[in-house]
Every structure is written in C-alpha cells, then in structure tokens.
Image (cartoon, rainbow, N blue to C red):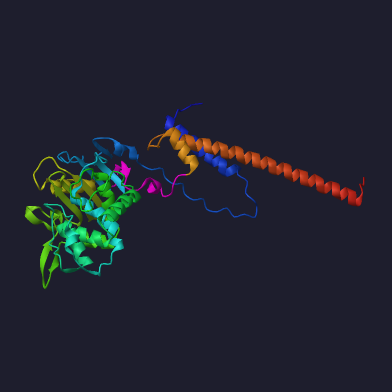
Amino acid sequence: MVIRYLPRSSSVRTAALTVGALVLLSTPVAATEVPAEPAPPRPLPAYSSALLDRPGVQVRPAPGVPSVPGDVSALSWLVADAKTGEVLAARNAHRPLPPASTLKSLFALTALPRLDADERHLVGAHELDQVGEGSSLVGVAPGRRYRVADLWRGVFLNSGNDAVHVLAGLNGGVPKTVRQMRAKARELGANDTHVVSPDGYDAAGQVSSAYDLAVFGKAGLADPEFARYCSTRVAKFPAGGWSYPIQNTNRLLTGADGVAPYPGLLGVKNGYTTNAGSTLISAARRDGRTLVVTVMNPQAGGGHAVYEEARSLLDWGFAAAGHVRPVGSLLPPAKTAGTAPGPAHAAAQAILGTPDEGSDWPAVLMVGAGALAVLGGVVVAARRRATVARRAAARAKLFEKAHGRREG
C-alpha cells in the first residue's frame, strides 16, 4: 500500500470536507420535511485591514501584475474600487495630514441633503466674516440673492470658501455644521478626520488622511447630486443682473494649464494650502469599473505633480484591478462582511486574529465545528431512538391491560 502525504493545508481542508459530508449524512431529517436549499457560505475577507495601519506602500499583487508606480512622491496616497470599497494599494493610508479643500467633500456630504437646491437666499455681510484671509473665493457678495444650487457650484468648481460659509449659515451655522461633519465622518468610518473649519482652510488640529478622503469620494459618487456637481467642468455664477463663467479647478477634469484631461474622469475635489500642499480626490470610470484615488502632498514635481501622480495611480489601478488581493476596505468594519459578526465569531477573532487568505485556521475551525455537529447529531439520533422505544413499550402495556394477555 502506498501512502501519500498531502501538504498540511491540503490535509486539513480535506478533513474539513470529510467532516462536512458526515454532517450532511448523519443529521436526521423528518420524513415530512422538505430540506431547504442550503445558503452558500459567506467568503472570508480577502484582506486584512491591519495592513493599512502599517507605514509604507501596501500592495499584494499576483505574478505578472505591473508594479506600483515608483515615482509617486506624495506623503500619502490610496487606490480603491469605488463600488466595492476594496483598497488595491496604499501608502501611509492613515497618516494624519491637513486636507485643504478636499475637506469640502465631507462638507457637501453633510450639508447637501439638508438644503433645498432651489431656495434663494439674500446674503448678509456678517455671513462672510469668518472667511479666512487668502481663501479661494467664487465672488459671493453681500446684498445679492443666490440660489443654493449656485452656491454649491461655487463650492465644487471654484472651491469658494465664501460659498461654504453662506451654506454653513443656512445649515444652522459653522459650529453646528462642524459638529455634523465630525459625526458624518464617524458614521462613514473615517476616524482619522478632525474638522475645525468646514471649508478645509488651515486650522490647528484639522487633519484627514488618504484613507478618509477616499471614503468621502466613494460616498460622494454614490449621491447623484454630489456626483453631478463634482463632475461639472464649467458653469455660470450670478452677479446681480449678469453672470460670469467659472471653471472647475480640477485640472485632470478640465485639461487646463497644460495638464492633459484624464479619460473617464468623474471629478471629485482638489485642494491646496501652503501648509497642506496639494491634495486631490479623483475618480474615473473605465470598462464598467470606477476607481477612486487620493493623493496628499507630493514632495516633487511642482504644482501639477498631484495631477500627474493621480494619473499614474489611476493607470496602475485599472491595469491591476482584478489581479491584486485587496489590502483593506473603505467600508466601516460592521459592513465589511455584509453583517456585524456574532459573539462567537468575535471571540474566535480575539483569540486567533483576523484570518488571512492561505491560512489553515478557517479549515481548522471548520473541522472543529463539523465534529461538534456530528457529535450533536449522534446524540439527537440516540435520544430519538430511545424515545421511540419507550413510547412503543408504553403502547404495548396499555394494549395488554385493555385486552388481556393471550398465549398460543
């Protein structure tokens, strides 16, 4: 007889399959019951979000996949699938950095649903008192009446801090809006973000991260109103009895200043301050797939580096998508696997850690669970047989008492 030794992982998985078959064969089923079609098992996550907590570049490519661009100088960046939330690659994903005007994406996620786009508002001088010196402006003037939709175009296209402050006032004031933005960030799982000013203007303690900005970009693209504003290239902004054109400052979208437009770009938001450097949330769609890329503070290449580094990362993402194992997810922990894990699952994770692809622990757990199920089935079957025997004996005694015992 020839004995062949399987690799450890193969033998464990074989044992798991064997136990699973025994479970199916040994589990008693009532004769009148029609067994329901078993639900397919939920796949274990193909990533460990702990990878995104590590410094440096995190990526898990398959053989033959192009390497992550080596000339990306940003302090922090991330590439993710905007539909599934799977993070394809990242560098220093959770590093806290000043976000500049990319924080306006969180402002829009917070205030857009609360304000009527068709409402007209007469701007008072006091509404612009807190606009920071040197801010980017769209040209909101006291004493003029604006539609809320016009103000939103001023935010998305011209990154107007004046428009942000007027909208924040309509939303109940800057302090209230800041509290709502902080709550919205927590709701989305963006735990690196601390909001001080709704327009992203430099303020002590105001930070976000490449991860959080990607979360905001993904959430924004899922909102048709947000998506429509952030992809608008040119619009007219009212100025009393006339209007003037405003152009989106995202050069990957418009192709301005010598930056070639990126095919399929959906926009989102760019930003810049001397403290934050250049920051960018960009998204693009190609062949039915939408990617979101965030880039924070490139260290080389001049003022247009943020766009060219985003371009390189988008190109890599479309080439690598489907051929890399995700290194994390943009979804909050409770939504990563579809539903919140139960107490038993949580206890197992606390002891064993998060399962990784290729690990034998899932199979070991399957073997243990299967063995318990087999044992339970045996016990149930034995009890059922004993119960049937007792009932038969009782019926026989009752029959004898009623009719008397006859011997032949």
Quadrant of the image occupied by residue 47: top left
Residue 356 on image: x %, y %: 38, 37
Q: Is residue 154 above or below residue 199?
A: below
Residue 234 on image: x %, y %: 14, 63
Drawn side of residue 159 relative to residue 117, left or right: left
**Residue that appears at 81% across and 49% down:** 395
Report the span colored magenta. Answer: 320-341
**Residue extending furthest left?**
258
Front residue of 33 and 154: 154
**Residue that appears at 48% across and 44% down:** 342
Residue 31 on image: x %, y %: 65, 52
Is residue 269 rendered magenta in the image? no
**Residue that appears at 18% across and 39% down:** 75
Quadrant of the image occupied by residue 302: top left
Can you say which quadrant of the picture contains the C terminus?
top right
Front residue of 131 and 191: 131
Q: Is residue 348 above or below residue 189?
A: above
Drawn side of residue 397 relative to residue 310, left or right: right
Quadrant of the image occupied by residue 372: top right
Drawn side of residue 73 relative to residue 257, left or right: right
Residue 357 on image: x %, y %: 37, 38
**Residue that appears at 38% across and 45% down:** 333
Q: Is residue 244 above or below residue 174?
A: below
Whether residue 318 is visible to the viewer of this picture, yes or no, is no
**Residue extending furthest front?**
126
